[in-house]
Amino acid sequence: MDEHGGWFPYPDSILDYFKALDVTHWADLYFRDGAERWLKDREPQRNELFQAFAEAIGSEADVNSVNEFLVELAAYTNQALTENKINAMMGLEFLDVDTDISPSYVEGLSSEERQKQHDVWISQLVLLFNDLSIAAHGESIFNLVDRAINNQDDDALVRAVQIDRSLLPYFQQHLIKQSMKGNSDFLDSLAYRLNNPPRRGTNKYPLLWIFFKDLLALGFFNKSVTSEKILTHYQRAVGKHPKFAIVDDQIVQRQRRKFNKLYRQVK
């Protein structure tokens, strides 16, 4: 993804595998109605996830319990990755790059396994594109789509399409209307976003912003969680990768202020 500036040039074999699993409409989940239908259909799984999280950090978790949970999770993940068993432990062996994804493989899957793989890939694609949107635009793809629809915000529309071009059919009528009107400003903006990958943006710390988003979703992006603590967990996750390494908590503080400002604007 990084080599292509944030876009995902999937080979035909992966696209055929997705088609066989009916992994074709993940963009439905960017829209409020689509997300609500998805969650309603998977209520038991969602309840299991919330229960597992509550058991891990408690129903009334404080900063210390979350900190302990993150440390344990990092240690578990590092051990699993070292032993190359993380997918097996999670029951996600099909995510391994050496897995056979030929048509005969998909045809041989049970209905339960097929549904499982379908749901995992839909969820992963939505999460990946949302993280990319946060990293590139400082705003979730859900917010971009919502503003494009409810505020008729064309800038939000073209930014969302830049992140995930599978959104184009969802705005087909609007695109036709603007084309028929000869709206050159809109068409120029759309052409720019379609021809320039999202990672050409000015955000120098994309993974840090994704981490901010995750902390915010957990409800632990407040003043009691210091920038120094955030940096400690970020360093555990990123390791010594030179492109994403951060060693100064002042950088975290500055980026945190920018993130808070942008989040208040789009909330």
Image (cartoon, rainbow, N blue to C red):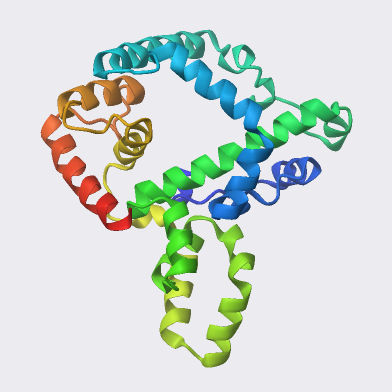
Quadrant of res 231 = top left
Q: Is residue 92 visible?
A: yes
Residue 62, compared with residue 140, is above or below; it is above
**Residue at image point 50% right, 47% down:** 129
Residue 123 spot, x, y in % from top left: 59, 38
**Residue at image point 55% right, 44% down:** 126
Q: Nearer the viewer, residue 47 or 74?
A: 47
Residue 64, compared with residue 24, is above or below; it is above
Q: Nearer the viewer, residue 31 or 121?
A: 31
Q: Is residue 122 visible?
A: no
**Residue at image point 20% right, 26% down:** 225
Quadrant of res 185 = bottom left
Q: Nearer the viewer, residue 80 or 53?
A: 53
Question: How many numbered marks appear?
Answer: 0
Residue 190, compared with residue 4, is above or below; it is below
Spot the residue most to the front. 60
Q: Nearer the viewer, residue 6 or 159?
A: 159
Residue 86 spot, x, y in % from top left: 56, 15
Please state if 96 lies on the left or on the right of 84 as rendered: right
Residue 96 spot, x, y in % from top left: 64, 24
Residue 258 spot, x, y in % from top left: 20, 48
Please state if 110 lies on the left or on the right of 251 as rendered: right
Spot the residue most to the bottom. 181
